[in-house]
Image (spheres, helix red, strand yellow):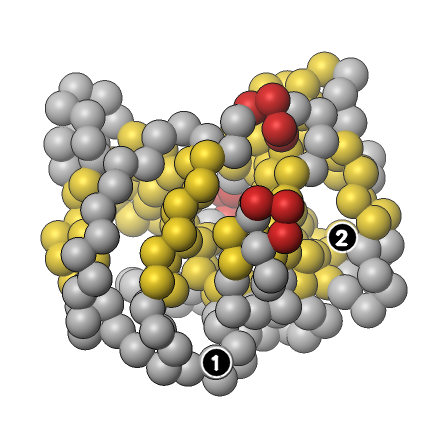
Amino acid sequence: MLTLRKASDRGAANHGWLKSFHTFSFANYRNPREQGFSDLLVINDDRVAAGKGFGQHPHKDTLGTGSVIRPGDVQLMSAGSGVAHSEYNHSANQPVHFLQIWIVPDVSGAKPRYQQEHFSAQKKRGRLQLIISPDGANGSLSVRQDARVYAALIDGKESATLELAADRYAYVHVARGKVELNGVQLQEGDGVRVRDEQVLTLSNGADAEVLVFDLRPQELPQMP
């Protein structure tokens, strides 16, 4: 079963320097029907003006890690027992578009950590590339949860298929462009809750960039 969450139904915030769309409840956007899905708590579609960003905000300790994220990069921060962090658009003249995603961990109070990896367009072209997993398989980043995240670039006649175990949920988010999921047309910003489906096929894309989350079969996130 596929349950569509249209891009136009998301929450929105416009702070001038930051324009953000919220798939699930976040900050001042509260929707009792959109409190996350399985272990997926937040998908924020953020656009930050040149030279602007988020000031340091705590979750306690600071690690001192710093890096520049470029197209194709995935950065994973595990706050764990606590870390303060900040994010800024490194460009002085170009806006930046990125997704901020929160996955609830299976433990609390773990040691904070950063991971970052580049996944080239070639790795994602016409296929679902594993980018996050519990064990860091195949060069993916490791997350403290029974969740896997795949990224794909689909255009024209390209297609990609993912087989899910019988007892799994999934969530599909279109970061850019247009694509079909099992024949259902999706636009940029659309999301789909997936239940009781074992084969997911992305096809007929138009410059599409897509994330697929392979998740535990539960409706709402549960804090450890």
Q: Is residue 82 left or right of residue 104?
A: left
Using the image, determine if residue 13 lies above or below residue 89. below
Pick whichever of labels 2 and 1 is earlier in the sequence.
Answer: 2
Between 91 and 205, the residue placed more toward the observer is 91
Q: Quadrant of residue 88?
A: top left
Task: Look at 71% across and 25% down and name the residue there.
Answer: 126
Q: Is residue 94 left or right of residue 9?
A: left
Task: Look at 19% across and 74% down and name the residue there.
Answer: 60
Numbered mark located on residue 222 in the image:
none
Rate crowding at label 1 as few (under 14), some (14 to 19) or many (20 or more) other CA atoms within 10 Å: few
Where's residue 174, x and y in %?
A: 58, 38
Q: Give, as a three-letter code, the residue at label 1.
A: Val
Q: How many marks?
A: 2
Q: Quadrant of residue 145?
A: bottom right
Q: Which residue is mark 1?
A: 107
* Residue 161 visible at all: yes
Between 216 and 122, the residue placed more toward the observer is 122
Rate crowding at label 2 as few (under 14), some (14 to 19) or many (20 or more) other CA atoms within 10 Å: some
Where's residue 151, x and y in %?
A: 60, 39
Q: Nearer the viewer, mark 2 or mark 1?
A: 1
Where's residue 216, x and y in %?
A: 68, 69
Task: Look at 57% across and 45% down and name the residue there.
Answer: 139
* Residue 208 visible at all: no
Using the image, determine if residue 201 lies above or below residue 115. above
Q: Secondary structure at mark 1?
A: loop
Q: Give, as a three-letter code, the residue at label 2.
A: Leu
Q: Quadrant of residue 218?
A: bottom right
Q: Is residue 104 left or right of residue 183?
A: left
Distance from Cα at disc 2 to Cα at disc 1: 30 Å
